[in-house]
Amino acid sequence: MQSYDFIVIGAGGSGLAGAMYSARLGMKTLVLGKTSGAELPVGGVITTTKVVENYPGFKKIGGMLLAKNLEEHARDYDLVEIKTEEVLDVKKQKKCFVVKTKKSEYSGKTILFATGTKWKQLPETVKGAREFERRGVNYCALCDAPLYKNRTVSVVGGSDSAAKEALILAEHAKKVYLIYRGEKIHPEAANLNRLNENKKIEIINNTNIKEIHGDEVVGKIILDKTFKGKKELDVDAVFVAIGHEILSNLAINLGVKVNEKKEIIIDHKTSETNVPGVFAAGDVTDKPFKQLITGVADACTAAYSAYEFLGREKVEC
């Protein structure tokens, strides 16, 4: 069994930054880039953002490019290995941890959970929601918007993420319906202005999708309220942007404490969890302000804390 000083579970921006920093501290590091339920490539959530304007050092950069830069930076260190393997289980074995994947098992002196989140699905009560998954029911406008050039699509959600999805889709589609169950959508002010100025986008508030219909792919949706005299809308896709599910089950099974949202509780000075030798960073934690820059900072803190931990404990696997 291969042994590492620092095993990072999750290869989003936070995980990659933690790996880079741990290697700088001389720790042999493994990054496992596919966690339970993750649909994203190495680089994580930021790969689905078209333009990033709030990461220090870059006035404007594409999310895919930023993720690539982070990955290349981590890979530049000989002490870092990145493997796209799904982690099935993490167990304590004496003073070390055994990480089991579909392909192998690895021994780690310390662990960093940077597993992030996955997209929430539409409720199973929405007829057709599962049937048309990946056949018109989609989760990433940046990934799939070009498929709907000059077509009509819908977005479900009222957050800033939903607004961004609608704006990306409007660059390709001829019509975008933004459907939200609440009274009023709540994106950031700048994106709300962009929505209001975009003639392709129409907002439907206080409304839910009840059913999704089609032949091989999505063809129409049924609403629970009348919109412009009818409950049926002809659409070629439904993009779901209703939030994320915290991917903390692996940590929970190890005995790591979480809050009511299933976010991993960390010491925000050190990124430590309640389990000695286990750290967490990024969207999977109870950090109230979740941004790439805050996740990166916490992951770097975790790497340094792990380095100090190993200096104190003299762990041998």
Image (cartoon, grey):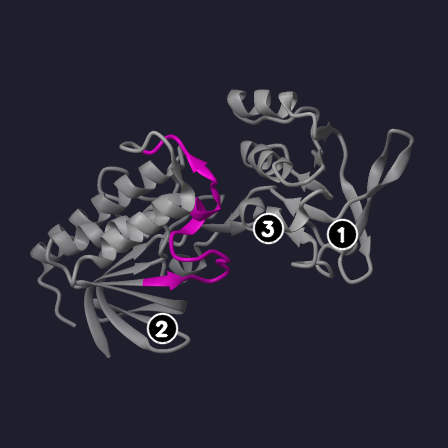
At 43% across and 57% down in the image, what residue appears?
A: 41
Three-letter amino acid code at disc 3? Asp
Mark pair 1, 2: CA separation = 35 Å
Which of the marked residues, 2 or 3, is nearer the chain's N terminus?
2
The one nearer the camera, 107 or 228, is: 228
Q: Amino acid at mark 2?
A: Lys
x, y percentage for residue 211? Answer: 81, 49
Quarter holding the N terminus is: bottom left
**Circle 1 residues within 10 Å: few <14, some 14–19, many ≥20:** few
Nearer mark to the viewer, of 2 and 3: 3
Disc 2 + disc 3, Cβ < 8 Å: no
Residue 245 horizontal/vertical position (percent): 52, 49
Q: Nearer the viewer, residue 196 or 210?
A: 196
- Please give the label number shown on residue 100: 2
The amino acid type found where label 1 is placed reads: Thr
Numbered disc 1: secondary structure? loop
Taking the view exactly as shown, the residue that stands out farthest to the right is: 229
Residue 282 placement (x, y as % from top left): 36, 45
Tell me whether the residue at label 3 lies in contact with that at label 1, contact meaning CB atoms closer than 8 angstroms.
no
**Residue 222: percent from the left, percent from the top?**
83, 44
Q: Which residues are magenta?
A: 32-55
| Mark 1 or mark 2: whose residue is earlier in sequence | 2
Q: Which mark is residue 125?
A: 1
Q: Which residue does the numbered mark 3 point to in the structure image?
A: 144
